[in-house]
Image (tube, coloured by chain):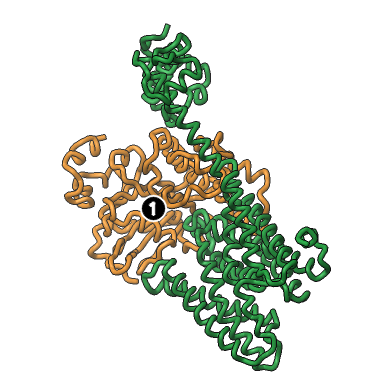
Chain colours: A orange, B green
Amino acid sequence: MVAIKDVNPVQAAPRNEGVQAPPPALSVAGLTVAYGEKPAVFSVDMTVAQGTMTAIVGPNGAGKSTLLKAVLGLVKPLSGEVRLFGLALSRARDRIAYVPQRASVDWDFPARVIDVVLMGLHRELGLLRRVRPEHLDRARACLARVGMQDFATRQIGQLSGGQQQRVFLARALVQQADLYLLDEPFAGVDAATEKAIIGVLKELQAEGRSIVAVHHDLSTVRAYFDHLFLINTRAIAAGPVADVFTGENLQRAYGGRLGEAQLAGGTLTG
Amino acid sequence: MIWQALTLQLGYNATLVALGATLLGIAAGVTGSFLFLRKRALVSDAVSHATLPGIGLAFIVMVAMGGDGRFLPGLLLGAALSSGLGLLLIAWMMRRTRLSEDAAIGAVLSVFFGAGIVLLTVIQSMNAGRQAGLDTVLLGSTAGMLQSDALVIAAGGAVVLLLVLLLRRPMLVVGFDPDYAAVSGTNVGRIDLAMMGLVMAVTVLGITTVGLILIVALLIIPPVTARLWTDHALRMVALAGVVGGLSAYVGAAVSATAPALPTGPIIVLASFVLFALSMILAPARGGLALIRRQMRFRRRVHRRQGLLALAVGQTIHEPFTLALLRREGLARADGVPTDAGRAAAAKALLDEARWAALRADPAHGLSASRYDALTRIETVLTPDQIAELDRHLPRPRGVS
């Protein structure tokens, strides 16, 4: 369980000096996850301060989603520790909400949009409590927040990709969590959905909540996020976007895979 | 005779058996629905076949202890133990080896069933009472069923139904999105285990009535049938219960009229009739509806293409399109548009231009995403919005 910190180029999180700073929304120390005998994430440290919006960025197969899944307890890490608001995952579940990749489920499942959003309440409802009008109101309010209020009784199989993604976000919103973890929320969605989702995420941040999203579109990193975590199996760089989003760091994360054009073009200047 | 059986006029015992079977059928349909939604329907086949060696061993043990080899609770206990072992083996093989689930199911199913058949053969050669009837566990029979047996089955079915009712919410969440369920604190492994336990309970209870070879049909056909009728998960579950209950009731009642008739096949055939009818008739997903929708779609595509061709001054030669347009009085036999056809063509062209403008404007993303070349723009935008759109439209030719 010992992280090899001295070879890790990422700066350690600043210690909370002085009095009672709030614990970070997420802190990861020495996390290694392997599939079979190939590490997908190796000895990663990561700290997400409360109230920030962080993009996890890296090339395909760099372990972005794996890192997120390890944080959420969906894959078992080989070593390392994950803390959410200073707590172990099992004690922090009420404070986190997960928005999976929308392609991870079968949308032919017999459910209406409102049923999927209500699934966000199943932890709160437990086995015995009935769905009451106030629960329905909350679910509808969350649908309205993502602009899907007119689709409440629509079959989920009839939704477009962007609409599916909004429904997933609404299901997480209804949990009223403090930390939202999203896996590729903008993958394959229309421009209007992308705008709607980023609008909601910025609102959440304005309310003091924290957001961590696996993200693949370098051209929007600056506009959407204030913190950046670059990963390629190892952590490459982490910190405020202004400091970390540099050509040098991207080159180190993407290697030859990042075209010169992408580096020189609007990506870094935008 | 069959009518009397169906209206429960064959005496107290037959009535009790039919009611027990019905309750079992409801429990099977309802439980099978969650298995179906979790996409693990085939596991039930392994569960049922894996009961056989347990039944054989239980029989041998009970006879050796000087008891009645066909004492139902004893047989059910043996069945539960060996199918539970089969389930554990499947889970173990999937975790420890790189075998996929279907391979693990196939291996467990065949080995357990083979071992069970060997045990049954051994039992045939033993000189113990009533063993001649033990092979009814394969295909089911209500003929020799005791009142106490029917009561055990009915009570077991009721307990299973209650448990399913209690666990319906986590089972649905896990069925739709297991990762999300896990993150929000559901122990997915435990819910799956509970679900498999309930399937095992239904299987074990159904052994004497439906038989272990065919119980899988009672777990799978009702949910598949119900799925054809509804897009709502809990309604599907309830409907599957009705289909299962009805099939089991018919099967038990019919087989009561002819003791030589095994119950299982009749139950399965009854549920298959319901499935086949649904397959054809179901309003959204049934075969007739599908054909009707495809034909309607084909007509809409051809009509639209025809109008857009007319709008740019082409004549229509394609016979299907021409027939469509002529039927509506939009074109003449030689493919030249009528006045009405010219107007409709101009409207189609204008709508295309409106759509193009809509799709060029990022503010209308969601509306624009409805474009599929067929959807009428009036169904997406209000008249005010269309008028607003038209103000910015370059006038296409052919519109007065």
Depth check, front residue: A167 or B369:
B369
Depth check, front residue: B115 or A178:
B115
Instruction: Tell me the amino acid under the disc marked 1.
Output: Val
Q: Position of residue B234 (x, y in %)?
A: 63, 51
Depth check, front residue: A54 or B91:
B91
Q: Is residue A255 left or right of residue B114?
A: left
Q: Quadrant of residue B205?
A: bottom right
Q: Quadrant of the N terminus of chain B?
A: bottom right
> Which residue is denoted by mark 1 in the rendering?
A48
Depth check, front residue: A126 or B61:
B61
Q: Quadrant of residue B316?
A: top left
Residue shown at 42%/6% (left/top)?
B400
At label 1, counting other C-alpha atoms closer than 10 Å, the crowd grade (few under 14, some 14-19, many 20 or more) is many
Q: Position of residue A169 (x, y in %)?
A: 48, 44
Residue shown at 70%/60% (left/top)?
B250
Q: Quadrant of residue A28?
A: bottom left
